[in-house]
Structure formats: C-alpha cells, structure tokens
Amino acid sequence: MRWFSQRVTGSKNRLPSTPYGVRKRACRPSKMAAGGKFGFQLLSRTFGFMEDREIKDLFMKWGLQGYLSVQTYMFEKHFQAYQKDDFVLDFLRDPKVTSTLLMPSKRGGLSAIGSAAASVTAKAVPCSIISMDFFDRLRADGLVHEDGRICGCFDEYVEGFTISDEIRKMLLMEESDHYDLYSDEEKEQFLFLLFRHVVLGGGCCQYEDNVEPYLSTVKTIYKQLLSVQKDPTTKALQVLSNVFRVTALDEKGNTYYPSEDSDHPQNFSYLLVDPLKRHVTVLCHVYGGSPF
C-alpha cells in the first residue's frame, strides 16, 4: 500500500554501492562551472519525529537519544545530482555551516563541527521505494510472526552487537538463512538503511520483541525527511530528494566527520537535498553509550 499521499517536507517551522568498511577515494576540489560556489544558511526547522514523545522514548530505549541530530540549511544555487562532490565540499567548508552544524559525540552531547573539510566523500544513496510493503517479506520469510513478534535465535556477538533475533542476524551475519532476503541493491536503499540503523541502535540499546515499533518509526522518519512529487504523465508518486552519505577528512587524510571511526555502520551522516526548495537536511548519528 502506498503511504505517500502528498508532498512531504516534515517541517513544522521554516526560516533548520560501496559496502560498509570499504573506503572511497576522497573528493578534492574541482573547478566549478560558471556561477561560483554553493552558499548555505541554517534554517529554523523542527521535525516531528525529533519532538514526538513516543518516538523520543523509543530513541532513548534504543540508545539513539542524544547521539542523533537533524538540521536543515537553505542553499542559493540550482543543484543537479552530478554536482554532489562540489556541493558536499562547499557545504563542509562554508563558515556558516562549520559554525552551526552539530556533530554528536560518542560520549553524548552535540557540538559544532568547527573545522572546514580538506576533502570529502559523497556516496549517492538510492531512495526510490515509496511503500512499506518492502518489509512484508519479513513475515513471509518467517523472521516475524503474524502478530509482529520477532523470531528469536541463540545469542551471538558480532561486530560489537548482540544478536538474539532473526532480524539482527539477517542484518549482520552472512551465515543467516535469511541473509539474501534483500538483494545487495535493496540493502543500499535509504529506507532499508534507516531500518538497519534503528534496529541496531546505539551503544546502550534495549531491543524490541515486536517489529512494529521499528517499522512505524522508520516510516515516520522517512516520510518527514524526503520530498515527493507526482509524475506529470503517470501521476505516480516519486521521490524528489537526492540522498548522499558523506564523510569529511582533514589535511592529513583522517576522517573526523561524522566520526573518526567512519567504518562503523552506526556512524553516519546523510545529506538529503531537495532541489526545488533548495534545502539540504543533515541526519547525523554517532555510536555511543548511555546518556546517563
């Protein structure tokens, strides 16, 4: 069932396929076409999923609260996807960004990124899925019971995560009977990545016994972060936003944003670009312990 019925911005207020662990060559500045660099201005914008009491309680339970930030900036020039490397480099060098872009700490709390990037990586993330039916196969393939209960398994410890159910086993272990439930291309989809992030959680995570809190939270975040529009010919809804997973490196080639440990699957920064509104939203998380 389609669950986008209108253009979604997720805003209450206005004017804020490379596998994990494989490093991409950082992009250094290239000559821009006529028109100069992109400029950015922080917007005062809130997102419902960051304010909703039920979701905040879930974030706390999953170890995400205090380690997640969302901000929106306006930019001045027309954007096209092929400009992503220059766009991200300009973004992470702009003084109006480096003085305001919040970077979570693995010890908890947020602080401005401060430093301008010497180079960046920007990986395009596909986001073409517009239906939560994408996750129906979790039930069809036996990872989840009809009532939503997640099927358990013997405890194992992999990559710092405790695996005690079939969903996390599918996400992290090639030995899982369900590892190929989603193709490599589907696992690169932004919707799948959001699901993975909330299921794995933070350093102090209480996992769910039922899949529904994961699915409802992912659906809310996805709808509020992305913009969609109707195809003028087919009238079908399609995602308008461009999504990029980014890192920033210093002069010595060391990654410092979103974290020094850029290979950890739960350290991420996504830039979601709305080319019509000329808005870019940053979703950033750093894997850390309990905020208490």
Image (cartoon, rainbow, N blue to C red):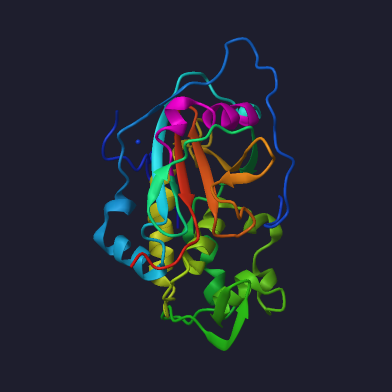
The N terminus lies in which quarter of the figure? bottom left
Task: Please say whether residue 99 is one of the residues in the magenta stretch.
Answer: yes
Q: At 69% across and 69% down in the image, what residue appears?
A: 180
Q: Nearer the viewer, residue 261 or 91?
A: 261
Judge whether residue 46 can be spotted in this image.
yes
Q: Nearer the viewer, residue 214 or 258?
A: 258
Q: At 57% across and 13% down in the image, what residue appears?
A: 36
Please give the count of numbered marks on the rendered protein: 0
Q: Position of residue 133 (x, y in %)?
A: 50, 62
Judge whether residue 140 can be spotted in this image.
no
Residue 75 vertical position relative to residue 23 in the rendered view, above or below:
above
| 120 to the left or right of 66 | right
Q: Nearer the viewer, residue 72 or 230?
A: 72
Residue at far top of view: 34
| 281 to the left or right of 78 | left
Q: Provide the major secondary structure of the magenta segment.
A: helix
Q: Magenta span covers which residues? A: 84-102
Q: Nearer the viewer, residue 10 or 159?
A: 159
